């Protein structure tokens, strides 16, 4: 359970036959007319696999540069959602029409011939707020909790959104943001922003790879400012990825960033549950309800592993408590009753053992070993009873 998420996912991505497939019915292509931009904007949607069976709203991930990155996002995010590394989200990919116009926050004296249209990030943020958010809420039950992620120029946009409209999003992910834009003004903007905000209950993840010198210097200056001035309630982290370059780090950054931002959503480990018991299990579920609004239960395989570990360590009272907890959550399962029977047999409480073996046998009559164990315990109890009777007669 303590293996890193990235190591686990890396193995899965390289073994194609094991990779989670996205159901085509969960992928939607649509469009919305932006009254702010005066143009139609295409949207690519990934819905949670449970979407058709629910009625409530979902948090939304806004994935920028979707024409290049949506397929990668679908691969990673669908796996993370389906395997409980992150909560189910509606994923909204937004392809560009005028990338440098929408993704750059201010005009710049640089590259006027290359980027004739630029400096419209505030307008695009307004378009998201006015046109895209309400559309996603109405058509796909998108909620008010939002994450925005981008790379390169859209990473610059994410950083600008964090500084200028942090109210629009709860979580921000910027991969190799173009911090040199406008003579690295972002560094001074961050300094000013943090100086003026003593509380920021947000999440921010940034990643940087092998960058050009001006980018690398800006990255170091920005993280230094954040180290010195970020408020304690701002959950932020940056990662250097020296084995990646500016363009190759996207998939790795997406996996790593999600692992960090949603680390409290991952199931507790077997070791944690063995140590903390039912209180740890219930505490985790309570936190998931409070933080994510989801009523869940721990998977049976995890609970079974905890029961077996407690049993192996001969912590029998704790094991019985956890087996009871497991059977309440999964009453159809026979194994918890069989394991309880083994514990009572080991501690020579044969009548109790027989009762639990009998329940296990009745719940799963296809298990030959369950039936044999029940019959053997009946026989043992009868033999012990006869032995006691013979002693009494003597």
Image: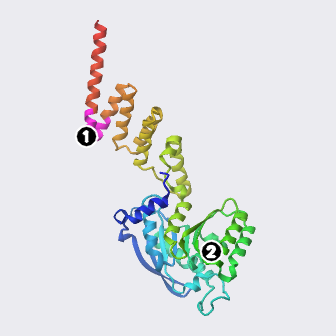
User: Front-most of 289 and 17?
Assistant: 17
Mark 1 crowdedness (10 Å alpha carbons): few <14, some 14-19, many ≥20: few
Mark 1–mark 2 distance (CA, rounded to whole Å): 60 Å
In the rendered image, residue 60 lying in the magenta stretch gets the answer no
Q: Residue drawn at (69%, 82%), measured in percent from left and top?
A: 183
Render colour scheme? rainbow
User: Front-most of 272 and 183?
Assistant: 183
Relative to residue 287, is residue 301 drawn left or right? left
Residue 224, position as x, y percentages in the image: 70, 67
- Numbered circles on residues, count: 2
Relative to residue 182, is residue 35 drawn left or right? left
Mark 2 crowdedness (10 Å alpha carbons): few <14, some 14-19, many ≥20: many
Q: Residue drawn at (51%, 86%), measured in percent from left and top?
A: 97
Picture quarter with the C terminus: top left
Query: Where 354 falls versus 287 (above or below)?
Result: above
Q: Which mark is residue 365?
A: 1
Res. 336 image quadrant: top left
Can I make out residue 55 in this image?
A: no
Can I make out residue 263 in this image?
A: yes
Q: Which mark is residue 260?
A: none
Q: Which residues are magenta?
A: 359-372
In the rendered image, residue 369 lying in the magenta stretch gets the answer yes
Q: Which residue is the site of mark 2? A: 161
């Amino acid at each position: 359970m303590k293996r890193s998420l990235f190591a686990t996912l890396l193995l899965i991505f390289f073994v194609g036959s094991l990779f989670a497939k996205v159901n085509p019915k969960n992928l939607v292509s649509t469009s919305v007319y932006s009254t702010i931009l005066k143009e139609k904007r295409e949207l690519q949607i990934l819905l949670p696999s449970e979407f058709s069976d629910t009625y409530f709203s979902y948090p939304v991930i806004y994935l920028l540069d979707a024409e290049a990155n949506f397929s990668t996002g679908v691969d990673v995010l669908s796996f993370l959602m389906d395997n409980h590394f992150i909560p189910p989200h509606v994923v909204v990919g937004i392809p560009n029409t005028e990338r440098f116009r929408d993704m750059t926050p201010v005009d710049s004296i640089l590259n006027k011939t290359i980027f004739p249209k630029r400096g419209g990030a505030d307008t695009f943020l307004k378009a998201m707020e006015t046109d895209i958010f309400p559309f996603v809420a109405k058509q796909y039950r998108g909620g008010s909790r939002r994450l925005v992620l981008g790379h390169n120029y859209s990473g610059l946009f994410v950083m600008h959104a964090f500084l200028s409209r942090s109210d629009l999003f709860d979580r921000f992910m910027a991969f190799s943001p173009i911090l040199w834009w406008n003579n690295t003004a972002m560094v001074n903007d961050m300094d000013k922003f943090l100086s003026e905000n003593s509380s920021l209950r947000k999440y921010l993840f940034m990643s940087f790879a092998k960058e050009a010198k001006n980018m690398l210097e800006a990255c170091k200056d920005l993280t230094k400012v954040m180290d010195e001035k970020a408020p304690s309630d701002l959950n932020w982290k940056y990662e250097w990825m020296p084995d990646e370059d500016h363009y190759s780090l996207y998939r790795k950054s997406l996996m790593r960033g999600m692992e960090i931002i949603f680390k409290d959503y991952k199931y507790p480990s077997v070791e944690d549950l063995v140590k903390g018991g039912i209180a740890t299990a219930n505490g985790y579920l309570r936190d998931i309800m409070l933080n994510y609004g989801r009523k869940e239960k721990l998977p049976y395989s995890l609970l079974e592993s905890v029961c077996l570990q407690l049993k192996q360590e001969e912590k029998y009272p704790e094991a019985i408590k956890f087996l009871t907890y497991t059977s309440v959550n999964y009453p159809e399962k026979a194994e918890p009753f069989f394991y309880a029977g083994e514990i009572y047999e080991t501690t020579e409480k044969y009548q109790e053992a027989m009762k639990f073996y009998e329940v296990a046998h009745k719940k799963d009559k296809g298990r030959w070993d369950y039936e044999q164990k029940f019959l053997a315990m009946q026989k043992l109890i009868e033999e012990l009873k006869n032995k006691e009777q013979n002693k009494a007669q003597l």
